[in-house]
Structure formats: C-alpha cells, structure tokens
Amino acid sequence: MLTVLQMNYYKIRFYKLYFRDRLRISAKKRKVHLKEIKNLNKMTIIYHNILLTYKTLKSSFPPKIHAEFCLIESKWNIDDDLVLIDHAIVMQESYLAKQYQINAEITNKYLNYSLSFIAFIQITSIY
C-alpha cells in the first residue's frame, strides 16, 4: 500500500514541478495560442483525476493505516504541494486567458484595418 501511495505522491510532485515550470515559461512568452490553453485544461483534468484517486485511496484505509498515512503525509508536505499546484493552475489559467484575449484584440484590430482598406478600395473603384 505504501508503494501505491508513494507513486501517487510522486505524481503529485511531478504536477507541482510541471505547473511551476509552465508558469515560468508562459510568463516569458508574448504570444499564446489556443492549443496551449487546451493543453493546460487537459493537464488540469489529469491532475484532478490523480488527486481524486489519491484521496479515494486515502479514505479507503482502515483507521489505523489511515492514521499512519496521515503522519507520512505530513512529513511529505502534500497539503502544501496541493495548495501550490492549485494556485499555479489558477494563475496560469488567468494569465493565458488574458494573453490570448490581448492577442485576439490585436489580430482583430489588424483585420479591421484590412477590411477598412478593402472597403476604401471598393468605394474608390465605384467612383
């Protein structure tokens, strides 16, 4: 049982490092594509699935094993890691959404300029 719990612990640690690194990388980028937002959503769903499996496994133990596991969990600082992961997910979602909106506004501005130019050419060709 301890090996299964340790495996889940390492999965959670991986996601902590993954989201922290993704947050650093996306903070340096200027352009954000829709694919990055979809990938973040997929990784968030996978993380929540692993967390659900972890919590279900933890709650299925008998009381004595559950108490021992809570001691191990406090040594591993899993609660702090979960809080950090949740904050990283929220920050990255808000940052990516804001950057994607800014990029979409810039693209729309250029499209409006080109449509205005095309309308100007059509009006001048009529007269």
Image (tube, grey):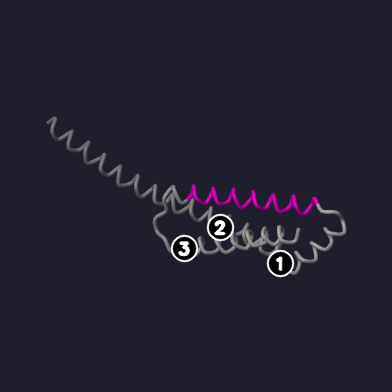
> Distance of mark 2 from mark 1, alpha carbons?
21 Å
Amino acid at the residue labelled 3: Ile
Report helix, strand or loop for mark 1. Answer: loop
Question: Against 93, is 111 above or below?
Answer: above
Task: Name the residue tied to disc 1.
Answer: 77
Report helix, strand or loop for mark 2. Answer: helix
Amino acid at the residue labelled 1: Asn
Q: Earlier in the sequence, mark 3 or mark 2?
A: 3
Nearer the observer, 29 or 108? 29
Task: Name the residue tied to disc 3.
Answer: 25
Q: Earlier in the sequence, mark 1 or mark 3?
A: 3
Q: Quarter-wise, where is residue 75 in the image?
A: bottom right
**Left or right: 10 in relation to 40:** right
**Left or right: 68 in relation to 101:** right
> Distance of mark 1 from mark 3, alpha carbons?
25 Å
Residue shown at the point (39%, 47%) measured from the top left: 104
Query: What range is drawn magenta here?
Result: 37-60
Q: Quadrant of the C terminus?
A: top left
Q: Main secondary structure of the magenta part?
A: helix
Task: Name the residue tied to disc 2.
Answer: 91
Residue shown at the point (34%, 47%) measured from the top left: 107
Q: Quarter-wise, where is residue 126 in the image?
A: top left
**Left or right: 82 in relation to 75:** left
**Left or right: 49 in relation to 26:** right
CB-based contact (under 8 Å), mark 2 and mark 1 = no
Nearer the observer, 58 or 31? 58
Give percent across and percent down for residue 120.
20, 38
